[in-house]
Image (cartoon, rainbow, N blue to C red):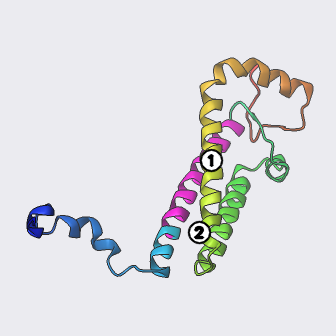
Amino acid sequence: MPNPSMTTMPTPAGALSVLCGPFQGLAGTHRRTARLVGLLAVLSVLSLVDLWLTLTFATSVGMLESNPVARAVMAMGCPNLLAVWKIACVGLACGFLFCARRSRWAEPAAWFCVVLLVWLTVRWTSYIGEMDQLTGLLGSAAMVGDPKWVVMGDASVLP
């Protein structure tokens, strides 16, 4: 019969406490809350990246905006208003999800939002990567008067 102490690997004292320490005492709904808070943090960071990229392109060369509500806010021509609107929307969504943290649907909803923002970030990455090839197309879209084309502030469309 093998010796039980020989079948487990010894761990240095304190090694696991460094990794598990912050999560000790988190059981059941507390663990779900910790996961939800992490997801909301990721959601907030990805939303800020989206805001930064939107403001960068909308105030420089312009961009095609598919969201009609965002397009209406951008049509007012105030980048600060767009920032306040986007931050308020994300803050409200995060607040609702945090208030519903005890619900079994809060975490899947947060995961859905994070997946959606990751998808949007991948689209931004693709858009930035192809910007050299798209410059002529974007300029012609602006000239044709595409209603999805937005330019904010003093930005001018590249020819």
Residue named by callout 2? 107
Q: Residues within 10 Å of mark 1 (few under 14, many from 20)?
A: some
Q: What is the secondary structure assignment of the residue under circle 2?
A: helix
Q: What is the secondary structure assignment of the residue under circle 1?
A: helix
Q: Main secondary structure of the magenta part?
A: helix
Give residue 74's position: percent from left, percent from top. Answer: 79, 48
Magenta stretch contains residue 57: yes
At 83% from the left and 53% from the top, the residue drawn is 69
**Residue 11 visible in the displayed image:** no
At 57% from the left and 48% from the top, the residue drawn is 49
**Residue 84 visible in the displayed image:** yes
Question: Residue extending furthest front?
Answer: 1
What mark, if any, has residue 50 been given in the picture? 1
At 53% from the left and 69% from the top, the residue drawn is 36
Q: Going by the image, does 80 lie left or right of 9? A: right
Q: Which residues are magenta?
A: 37-58
Q: Nearer the viewer, mark 1 or mark 2?
A: 2
Give residue 55's position: percent from left, percent from top. Answer: 66, 44
- Rendered image quadrant of residue 16: bottom left
Q: Amino acid at mark 1?
A: Asp
Q: Amino acid at mark 2?
A: Glu
